[in-house]
Amino acid sequence: MSNRRDSLRRVRQLNRATKGRAFNKNYTWAGEKRGGSPLLKVVLIVVGLAIASVLIFLWLKSSGRLSGSDDVPEVKVVATQAPKPTEEPEEEDDEDFDVEAGAEQMPKTATFIQGPRGWRSKADWSGEWGDSEYDGRRFAGFGCGLCVMANFYTSFTPYQCSPVDMYKYTKKVTNYEGRGAIDWVYVSQTLSSLGFITDTGRKPKKYKSFEKLIEEALGAMVVISSAYDDSYWKDTPGHYVTILGYDADSQKVFLGDSGDLEHNRSWVPLKTVYKAIKLSNSTHYLRVLAYNESMDQWKHKKISGDWCKPDYWTR
């Protein structure tokens, strides 16, 4: 009886201590609180391991240990520092820009000038378009791509046109609305209607690959920016230039630069062009591979408007 009374007394004490809760589930007979649910412990352990795994994965990814891509990294232009090229040159070239040899060595190529300085000084290949407005905007502010296209048509076909002739034709055969820099898709569409076989692409990671692309082409249109290399172009956020010839021995290209009188008709190291390619554009170059006269839907015969015809241009 004494043991039974002691047990009942102990139960009453525990009930008072636990305030009526089920002491046998939450407390030991000694009055100590039991541990948490085993299932809760398992859940906490699993969550902890998952968090640790995510942190380890993020650390490995940020350190580059999980990257196996060979793609060219996306480069963002920073105003205070130009991005590094995708490939460091084997050695620095001595810059050698031969302007005088241009007209003598490439007399059958056209290199139109887009702006007013050339026209006012009556420079070869300048025209009245350089000091005129079209659709409410000065041609000098957006005409570099159209000059490139006119260079191709006048240099590589039996026909010829001015940059403004090309402007009007491009608006006719594409959805290009004018008044602004022409996009690559409209360049491709227009050149295709003129009988040209072309392709477009992005800057290869290796200079040798780019050199091969240019060597195999009839000519090329390249977008450059001084933000990536300012050894030749200065204060040039974005600009289309024309490659009209390539000399494998010197690795130089004959350049048509509609925005700069001093650069126009110059032999420039191809590597200089390669380093200055504007990587933030979706497309970096367009190559002209061939011309088929039977596919030419225009066959335009005249460079229209007032312009400064060079002495060596016989057509």
Image: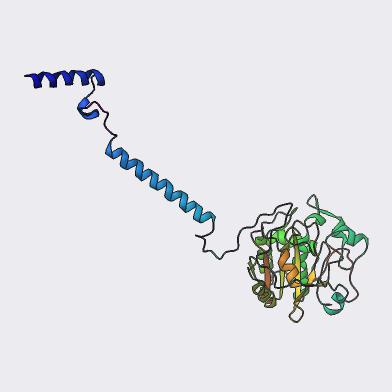
Tell which of 202 and 217 is nearer to you.
Answer: 202
Left or right side of 103 for 3: left
Q: Which corner quadrant of the image does residue 301 belong to?
A: bottom right
Determine the main secondary structure of the stretch shown in magenta.
Answer: loop
Q: Where's the C terminus, which quadrant?
A: bottom right
The residue range painted magenta reads 30-34
Q: Is residue 133 magenta?
A: no
Let me know if residue 271 appears in the view: yes
Task: Check the image and name the residue furthest to the front.
Answer: 2
Task: Check the image and name the residue furthest to the right.
Answer: 121
Task: Check the image and name the residue furthest to the left.
Answer: 1
Please tell me which residue is depicted at 88% across the width and 58% down the height of the picture.
116
Please tell me which residue is depicted at 27% across the width and 39% down the height of the picture.
38
Residue 17: x percent and y percent?
25, 20
Q: Is residue 303 above or below residue 180?
A: below
Tell which of 78 and 15 is nearer to you.
Answer: 15
Q: How is the image coloured?
A: rainbow
Let me know if residue 195 appears in the view: no
Q: Which corner quadrant of the image does residue 75 belong to?
A: bottom right
Residue 124: x percent and y percent?
89, 68
Residue 258: x percent and y percent?
81, 64
Q: Is residue 23 above or below residue 173?
A: above
Left or right side of 135 for 2: left
Residue 304: x percent and y percent?
83, 65
Q: Where's the N terminus, which quadrant?
A: top left
Count up the numbered dots: 0
Tell which of 180 and 72 is nearer to you.
Answer: 72
